[in-house]
Image (cartoon, rainbow, N blue to C red):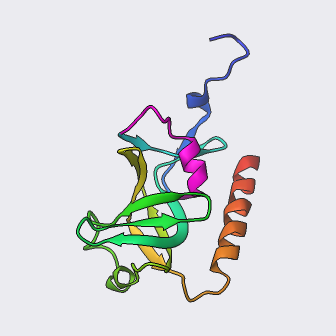
Amino acid sequence: MMEDEVDVVEMTRQVSHPGKFFVKQIERQCPSALSDCKLKPCFSRFQFTKVWIQGVVTSVHPASQTFTLDDGTGVLVVNYATFVSKIDPQALSSIRQGRVLVVVGPTSKKRNEIVIVAHKLVDVSDDPNCETTWIADVLCVQKRLSRD
């Protein structure tokens, strides 16, 4: 490494609380050559062990306890099987096509799909401003992180 190069790993600080991301941001950080891997999305100097995503449920697969979530920038798979006993039953009943959900959990890449393992699900479908405020919230948080 040359003197003026900076080691990105040294500059990155791992953060245990979830980071708010758009799906496209996570996709950009995932090397296409890797088919199965754990992802820790980064923003600025921060590396997040969990992400916080909001989107519309586009399909539900009860047998595998998964569903797809579209946030307008991309689609990812949400797996709620591992933590189904810890997720609020009311939240589980809201896993229906067309519902707007917030999902928090760690991400990985399996069979060339971005997967988030749901630690928490919240249905925000009844809030008419949920999509607009989500976009503003993500941008605001990321702007603040880029200054830190």
| Residue 27 counted in the magenta span | yes
The image shows residue 9 at horizontal and vertical percentages of 55, 30
For image coordinates 45% across by 44% down, the residue present is 39
The residue closer to the viewer here, 26 or 56, is 56
Look at the image and tell me whether residue 31 can be seen.
Answer: yes
Residue at 47% across, 68% down:
103
Residue 69 in percent (x, y) is at 48, 66
* Magenta span contains residue 76: no
Indicate the position of residue 10 as horizontal and vertical percent values: 58, 29
User: Image height check: is 5 above or below 135?
Assistant: above
Residue range highlighted in magenta = 18-35
Q: Is residue 148 visible?
A: no
Among the 4 quarters of the image, the one containing residue 5: top right
Q: In screen coordinates, is 115 left or right of 12?
A: left
Extreme top residue here? 2
Residue 110's x, y, as percent? 35, 46
Residue in view at x 36 percent, y 72 percent: 60
Report whether 1 appears left or right of 106: right
Seen in the picture, residue 77 relative to 122 is either above or below; the reply is above
Q: Which quadrant holds residue 80?
A: bottom left
